[in-house]
Structure formats: structure tokens, C-alpha cells
Image (spheres, rainbow, N blue to C red):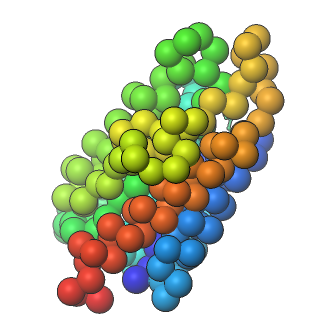
Amino acid sequence: MHIFIAYHSDYGSTEKMAQAIAAGASASQPDCQVSIKQVTDTTLEDLQQADVIFFGTPVHMGSMAWQMKKLVDETSKLWMENLLEGKVGGVFATGGGLGSAGGGIEQTLISLHSNFLEHGMVVVGFPKSLPGYADAGLQWGVCARTGNHEGMPQGISEAALVAARSYGAHVAAMAAHILGADL
Ligand SMILES: Cc1cc2nc3c(=O)[nH]c(=O)nc-3n(C[C@H](O)[C@H](O)[C@H](O)COP(=O)(O)O)c2cc1C
């Protein structure tokens, strides 16, 4: 099973989350191959060759960063030929989160789900029973607030990275279950 993680990160928080997801996936399914790339280096071939795809982005002005949206739009070429159909997907995001409701992180995760579902992919959420959910979980995926009370960056917490490892492990395990017969 090949797991591919594409992320955008300007200041490193989303990148740390991507690395923690990769660590969790590898620990959960030692035989799988895990690749991580910045979204600007990701090719359509990378996505086509993967069995499991994670997309991760910081929240920018209430939704995904344009670098992630650019790749999402480019996948329309794969959509034309149903080339991502049946793959398993997971999503993650970080946001400064000024204000009590999270500054758009839910919308960002749901928007990535929509893109995966448009391709006919199977999206795996984040069950609340898993480690880390209370600190950095939403039913749609793993997410973390990285700003302080004034909205200034303070980085990603260890608790959020625990959640990311847990989510990576869960998606990999679910993918092995879902795709097992075909791999
Ligand atoms: C241009 C820009 C717009 C942003 N807009 C939002 C926003 O709407 N909501 C939010 O919660 N955080 C927002 N942030 C904060 C980032 O989402 C947050 O700092 C994120 O964790 C950065 O991730 P990174 O370290 O991977 O780049 C914005 C940051 C930038 C640079």
C-alpha cells in the first residue's frame, strides 16, 4: 500500500503535522510505503500512483491556501478519467484560529473532503475515541490552532502532533482494511 501526503506550509506547523501523520501511518502499517511532498512539488502522477492520499493545508483567509487549491484544480484532469476513484483519503489543517470558532478550519477540512468525494474516493474521518481528538480533532480530520490569544503564531503543540500520529495510524489501518483485498 502506498500512502502519499501532500501539504502546503509557509511557517512549518502544517509540515510538522504532515510528518506526524506519516509517522503514525508507518507505525500502524509497517509494510506500507509513505511519501511526503510539498504540494508545489506534487505531480498528478504522484496522486495516481498512491492508494491513500492525504491533503493538508494552513487556513488562509478562511479556506485552503491557494497552493493547495491549485493542485486540487489540476486534479480535474484525473477526474475526467476517474483515475482517483476508490482511493482512500484523509485531510488535515492548521489555523491561527483567532476567535473562538477556529477561523475557518472546519470549512477548510470539509472543502477538501468535497474534492476527494468528487473523485469517488473513500474519505476517512477522525473518530472521537482516538488519542488526541480532544486536543486537535474534528470528525473530518486532524486540525490544530497554532496562534495565541492575540492571533500571533505560537507553533504547533505536542498534543496536536499526538492527534496527527493517531489520525495517520487510523487512516492507514482503515485503508488496509478497505483496500486489503486488492493489494
Ligand atoms: C495569508 C494568511 C492568511 C491566514 N488566514 C487565516 C484564517 O483565515 N484563519 C485562521 O485560523 N488562520 C489564518 N492564518 C494563520 C495560519 O493558518 C496559521 O498560522 C497556520 O498554522 C500556518 O501554518 P504553516 O506554519 O504550516 O504555514 C493565516 C495565515 C496567513 C499567512
Q: Is residue 94 left or right of residue 108?
A: right
Vertical placement of residue 45 versus 126, above or below: below
Residue 93 position within the rendered picture, expressed as x and y whole percent measured from the top left: 54, 40
- Closest to the observer, 81 or 118: 118
Q: Is residue 113 left or right of residue 155?
A: left
Quadrant containing the C terminus is bottom left
Residue 72 seen in the current view: no
- Closest to the observer, 89 or 77: 89
Ligand 1 quadrant? top right
State the residue at coordinates (32%, 67%).
Answer: 174
Residue 79 position within the rendered picture, expressed as x and y whole percent measured from the top left: 24, 60
Vertical placement of residue 181 versus 164, above or below: below
Residue 157 position within the rendered picture, expressed as x and y whole percent measured from the top left: 72, 40
State the residue at coordinates (53%, 21%).
Answer: 102
Residue 116 position within the rendered picture, expressed as x and y whole percent measured from the top left: 30, 52
* Residue 146 quadrant: top right
- Closest to the observer, 131 or 151: 131
Q: Is residue 78 left or right of residue 152?
A: left
Residue 172 seen in the current view: yes
Vertical placement of residue 159 versus 150, above or below: below
